[in-house]
Amino acid sequence: MMRKIGLLGAVVVLLAMGGNAVAAEGELPRQEWSFNSIFGTYDEAALQRGFLVYKDVCSACHSMNLLSYRHLSGTGLSEDQIKAVAASVQVPDGPNDEGEMFERAGLQSDRFKAPFPNEQAARAANNGAYPPDLSLMAKARPGGPDYIYAILTGYEEPPAGFQLNEGMSYNEYFAVSANQIAMPPPLSDGAVTYADGTEATVPQMARDVAAFLAWAAEPNLNERHQIGVGVMLFLIVLTACLYAVYRKVWADVH
Amino acid sequence: MSDAPRFKNPVVRWVDHRLPIFSFLHHQQVYPAPRNLNYWWNFGSLAGIMLVVMIVTGIVLAMHYTPHATMAFDSVERIMRDVNYGWLLRYLHMNGASMFFIVVYIHVFRGLYYGSYKAPRELLWIIGIIILLLMMATAFMGYVLPWGQMSYWGAKVITSFFTAIPLVGQSITEWLWGGFNVDNATLNRFFSLHYLLPFVIVAVVFLHLWALHHHKSNNPLGIDIKGPQDTIPFHPYYTVKDNFGIGVFLLVYAAFVFFGPNFFGEPENYIRANPMVTPPHIVPEWYFLPYYAILRAVDDNFIGSWILFGYTLIDAKLAGVIAMFASILILCFLPWLDRSPVRSARFRPAYRWFFWILLLDAFILGWVGANAPDGVWNGIPFLWIGRIATLYYFLHFIIIMPLLSVFERPDPLPHSISQPVLKGGGFAPARVHAKPMEKA
Amino acid sequence: MMAHSAHGEAIASSGHDAGETRRDFLMLGTGAIGAFGVAAVAWPFIDQMNPAADVLALSTTEVDISKIEVGQSITVIWRGSPVFVRRRTTEEIKAAEEVNLNELKDPQPDSERVKPGKAEWLILVGVCTHLGCIPQGQRSGENRGEYGGWLCSCHGSQYDTSGRIRKGPAPLNLAVPPYSFTSDTVVFIGAGQEASKA
């Protein structure tokens, strides 16, 4: 019986290894993230740096409309800092008593301000391409933050003989569209100035914004891991007790 | 009942005299179960637990979910971000579905191995298949509710299959959709039915348990209970064993919920549904992959269209749908396809081989279902792997089972559960382990 | 064999047999651990019905009162209900302060219903304490009733310039929400100073 299970398991493993029909070339390099392991948590400093990159670079084209400013407390920003961030943008509101829409300073409860009012406006401003919303990007692509980091650092000169379409850039890891991506390289060294003095190289900014996007997609990871460890320990103890009770009760049957 | 208990507590007695719920519970406690059940018998109770978990988590999620096409996706994200412990409830429900199917599939394969579908448990088995079908319908509709890309396109692909029905197909499909496409009307009704069906499952599970209690459980030896020496009361023996099994199961469940909550899922479903953009690969959840492979195994080149007098009676799309449903419905006929008087595979050396091959075939079908239909593995197109695996699947039930019934020479059966030495005593072939009191 | 079953059933132990006491301790301990687990699991299911983070985020509001003129009233929304913000005239304040408390159904001095030094500003939850209608008197031209405050047209309750019930079926004065002046021109309405977070 165990022999059969072992055989079956070996077959399944072999299938899994050899069975992937997707090409292995251009394989996604894996990064190390503070939140990857079982006990992992987000690095708040990286999240705040990443938010700055989003705010100063990405938010020009990409919305994050599932986030409200108040959610930023998960990155470790203080309430005053969050209020300041929110107040620094003008958000649409209304209608007022005259029936007109107006703009006002943002509040913590407001959603992140979107760069464009709708998809059509976004496309019109970007040569017909639609910069996707980033709220869930880290969960919406296989590889998550690894993928985001790879894309942001994967811009290269196209290989010889490669047909690059008008307005497109070559990206090593943008396989979904045969390596042609409509977004020009968004990051360049020194594009932002980090408050904590970290040097803003492209890989550093890519790493920070990938971490920020990972948090944005899964803000409860810290709590989930923490509760998870507690639950597993509890269940191990409980299962051990239940096993002991089982053996005790069955002792007279055997 | 002859051994109705005499309760000490007068309140209990008053209630029981009018509504014998305490007698009923007592009966469940002393209910005799074979003494030799192994751990493969834990999975029924695990399935029951998962049904309760799914209903409870589903009800609390429904307090926050909005079943409208423009708000569904956002309402789920609100649950994940803003509702207290919403992320936990969502991940419990999401991973609970996968755990439910894992447990039920193991439960089914246990039945296949030990002949639990044979007389007098044929109806018990068929009711189980009905539960499986209801689960599949519930899971299919549930997956549509978050209204992600895979939700929408999975719904589109599967509901479109009804157009394959001759003459009335298009009308039926538009009736299902509530429109000319999968849209808000579809989502709303799927929510209503997704909420309803689990309670239908509860009712059918009640029938399942009633049928079970009538002839009692099967056991690893596959031989009948001869008397009280073969049984032990369900409580406390199997209650404590089930509790232990639940503990182990919860460890696995919790590991997924807390440390790998998106392991079973598709990243594509974290993208809002867009009717204008088809995802590169449309795949159902893992528990549907084998049926998906069977569905796609049939296309024009394989079966051709059945054309009579210029009318297409069955085109490839319809044949695929028929094959897919047939793969589950054929299980209902198993008690009549497999007529071997020996229940348990433990004493059926030839059948054992085919059981494991069937299991391997199921895994292969699942693997094929996960891959793109035009993909290739080591030079072999997945389409052909899928066809051979599908063919073998039906071969197993339609040809191999009946033949085995006639030609297999089973091992000698033990005398009874409590004394599993061989009938007539004497020489014991190597395969049968005559261990007294079968342990887990 | 039946004896085995009887022995196997969980029965209250006499405590004499060391093995049985140990077994009972094990059962009891396991049961206690299990019960704790059930309670721990139950909590998220109960807590999920409590207001979610986005609801809490809207549970406070800041009102800019710089543009409100003397004698003017505005209505803002707080926790789904209207809140009346009235900048009272000196006559209205005087009338409110001079009322004999014995005349009141729900006696409360005006000073308790405003902030010290800010008697000009009357901030009330605009929901009639009878059956929940919204009293009239906010807009210019609306009937403020006999006492110059508010009149509820549903069943005739009348409130004075301090929002206290003077006539009609309402049992209590209009409620004063928790609020504070964060500056001379901004009023923060809601419990405590902390804004709610995610």
Image (tube, coloured by chain):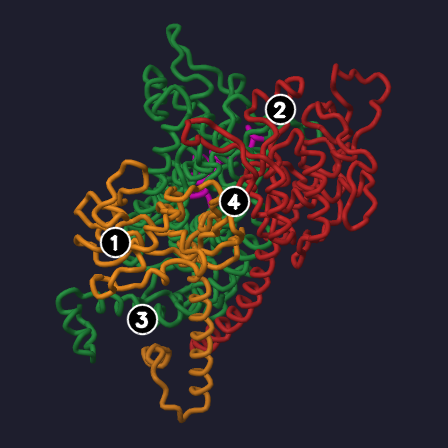
Chain colours: A red, B green, C orange
Is B396 colored magenta in this rendering?
A: yes
**Residue highlighted by disc 4:** A109
Q: Residues within 10 Å of mark 3 (few under 14, many from 20)?
A: some
Which region shows up in magenta? B386-408
In the image, A128 versus C38, the foreground residue is A128
In the image, B322 versus B400, the foreground residue is B322
The structure residue drawn at horizontal position 53% and vertical position 51%, both measured from the top left corner, is C198
Asked if badge 1 and badge 2 are on a common chain, one would say: no
**Residue highlighted by disc 3:** B228
Which chain's residue wears label 4? A
Which chain's residue wears label 2? A
> Which type of secondary structure does the marked residue at label 3 adopt?
helix
Q: Nearer the viewer, mark 1 or mark 2?
A: 1
Q: Nearer the viewer, mark 4 or mark 1?
A: 1
Q: CA distance from mark 1 to mark 2?
A: 53 Å
- Sequence-earlier tag: 4 or 2: 4
Q: Is residue A108 above or below residue C115?
A: above
Main SS class of the magenta portion in the image: helix
Q: CA distance from mark 1 to mark 3?
A: 71 Å
Q: Position of residue B121 (x, y in %)?
A: 32, 51
Asked if badge 4 and badge 2 are on a common chain, one would say: yes
- For badge 4, the amino acid type reads Ser
Q: Is residue C139 above or below residue B263?
A: above
Query: In the rendered view, does B124 fall on the left or right side of A127?
Result: left
**Residue highlighted by disc 1:** C129
Q: Position of residue B233 (x, y in %)?
A: 34, 70
Q: Residues within 10 Å of mark 4 (few under 14, many from 20)?
A: many
